[in-house]
């Protein structure tokens, strides 16, 4: 494993790169990159040292940025990133993921694009847009955005995507057809007798466990949920958490039953850390029980919000866990979330973090 | 040839592009299409679905606010200016 630990951070005003060593005690900060564009999501490939940054400029529209030298130089492209002149305007790119030479981009209004040339050109995955429920898709507070893309670890034809406020979908045929994967996921903002529709769930973040590709977790607007069959059925695992509401979630890179989330106080109560006391919650039994971790985090007047992509883990033996706030603070733990320290402050509002070892 | 004057924030996306460029075309649409030939990717930054000039980009032909269909005379100066927006 390499000597450097790298965080790529997307913010409302550009991308940033934080670098440290294996101890992860002190960090350097580079940025803003990508000409200060709002960056919703980033991805880093430790082997090629390629970084992708997805977002959109208020002036110049959506694009995916690419750097092949760890952020020193950048290019950008949106060639093919369009629904056509008769279709809706794409506002921005919300999600980015890569798998076996293919890069996927999720956009607003919700749709999926793929690139087989590293992000130089894009093509629309029409099968998802043609889903029979498309006419009923409704936006969440952040817009009608496809924000999370989870390729299956071994089957290149399987991909899950998460759309707010529509829910989770899976393709098993490389994107030609898609099925909703929301059974058992509660939509608590609907009337009591209609809280389990086929679609309409407000999934905030979808993550895959490290044990082969059938165990998924999601932090939803209305709770935390687990599936052991690739999303066909979900069980709520919110019990033990201080709130059902939160945005981010991350999974341990090797332990399939370990996950972290950051509960906020509630969708109608301000959406900040409960009681102004910052904490990350961890489960080591796939969400059956939860433990609060707050050592090193502010415990007074910490009315912080952590958004859906603003949490990440690195792959080191003692996994590093990181989260960023809308106030531009970035916290890190080098002991799997037990103790924390502030590793950057005064950044623009943080929208995404990815971690890698190089 | 029209002379197109580009803003700093746009030039930064295409390193090496000069601030003033000669471009041919009898309409703004054709001028931007010629810009895109010279600087690939320029069309996507200036135009959106429709096609239309992006909502927060303003194009002026001889000092007048223009659309894609606005006529461009041979020796006209075309200014591309980002809108007053942001935060």
Image (cartoon, helix red, strand yellow):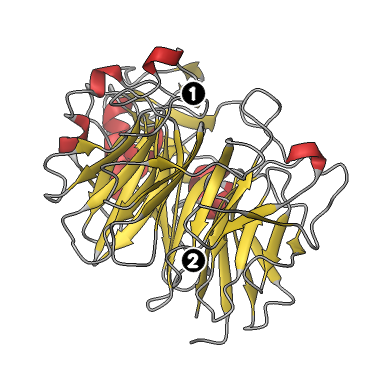
Could you tell me which residue is drawn at 68 percent across and 68 percent down? Answer: A333
Disc 1 secondary structure class = loop
Asked if residue A24 lies left or right of residue B44, the reply is right
**Which percent across, then down, holds residue A266?**
65, 30
Disc 1 crowd rating (10 Å Cα; few below 14, some 14-19, many 20+) is some
Disc 2 secondary structure class = loop
For residue A283, which quarter of the picture?
bottom right
Q: Marks 1 and 2, Cα distance to the nearest angstrom? A: 28 Å
Answer yes or no: are tags 1 and 2 on the same subunit: yes
The disc label shown at residue A153, or none: none
**Which percent across, then down, holds residue A152?**
26, 59
* Residue for badge 2: A252
Residue A32 versus residue A191 in the image, above or below: below
Give whichever of A123, A60 is nearer the camera: A123
Marks 1, 2: nearer the viewer: 1
Asked if residue A286 lies left or right of residue B85, the reply is left
> Is residue A277 visible in the rendered structure shown here?
yes
Could you tell me which residue is drawn at 35 percent across and 41 percent down? Answer: A234
Give whichever of B80, A259 is nearer the camera: A259
The disc label shown at residue A188, or none: 1
Q: Which chain carries label 2?
A: A
Give whichever of A9, B28 is nearer the camera: A9
Q: Residue furthest right?
A: A300
Residue A239 versus residue A25 in the image, above or below: above
């Amino acid at each position: 494993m390499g000597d450097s630990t790298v965080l790529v951070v997307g913010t409302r005003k550009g991308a940033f790169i934080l670098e440290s060593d294996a101890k992860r005690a002190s960090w350097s900060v580079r940025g803003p990159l990508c000409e200060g564009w709002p960056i919703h999501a980033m991805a880093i490939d430790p082997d090629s040292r390629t970084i992708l940054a997805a977002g959109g400029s208020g002036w110049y529209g959506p694009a995916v940025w690419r750097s092949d030298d760890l952020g020193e130089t950048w290019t950008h492209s949106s060639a093919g990133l369009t629904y056509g002149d008769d279709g809706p305007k794409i506002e921005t790119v919300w999600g980015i993921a890569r798998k076996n030479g293919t890069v996927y981009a999720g956009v607003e209004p919700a749709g999926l694009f793929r690139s087989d040339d590293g992000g130089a050109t894009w093509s629309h995955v029409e099968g998802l847009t043609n889903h029979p429920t498309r006419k009923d898709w409704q936006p969440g507070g952040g817009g009608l955005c496809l924000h999370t893309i989870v390729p299956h670890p071994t089957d290149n034809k399987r991909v899950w995507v998460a759309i707010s406020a529509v829910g989770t979908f899976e393709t098993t045929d490389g994107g030609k057809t898609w099925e909703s994967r929301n059974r058992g996921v509660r939509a608590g903002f609907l009337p009591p007798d209609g809280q389990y529709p086929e679609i309409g769930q407000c999934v905030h973040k979808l993550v895959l466990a490290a044990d082969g590709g059938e165990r998924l977790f999601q932090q939803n607007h209305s709770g935390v949920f687990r599936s052991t069959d690739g999303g066909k059925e979900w069980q709520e695992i919110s019990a033990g958490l201080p709130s059902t509401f939160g945005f981010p979630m991350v999974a341990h890179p090797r332990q399939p039953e370990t996950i972290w989330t950051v509960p906020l106080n509630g969708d109608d109560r301000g959406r900040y850390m409960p009681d102004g006391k910052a904490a990350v919650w961890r489960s080591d039994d796939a969400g059956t029980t939860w433990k609060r971790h707050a050592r090193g985090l502010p415990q007074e007047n910490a009315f912080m919000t952590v958004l859906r992509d603003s949490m990440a883990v690195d792959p080191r033996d003692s996994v590093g866990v990181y989260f960023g706030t809308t106030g531009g603070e970035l916290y890190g733990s080098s002991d799997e979330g037990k103790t924390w320290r502030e590793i950057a402050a005064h950044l623009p509002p943080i929208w995404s973090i990815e971690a890698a070892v190089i | 040839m029209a002379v197109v004057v580009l803003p700093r924030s746009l030039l930064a996306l295409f390193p090496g592009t000069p601030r003033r460029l000669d471009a041919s075309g009898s309409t703004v649409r054709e001028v931007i299409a010629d810009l895109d030939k010279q600087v690939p990717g320029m069309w996507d930054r200036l135009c959106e679905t429709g096609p239309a000039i992006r909502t927060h980009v303003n194009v002026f032909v001889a000092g007048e606010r223009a659309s894609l269909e606005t006529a461009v005379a041979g020796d006209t100066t075309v200014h591309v200016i980002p809108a007053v927006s942001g935060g």
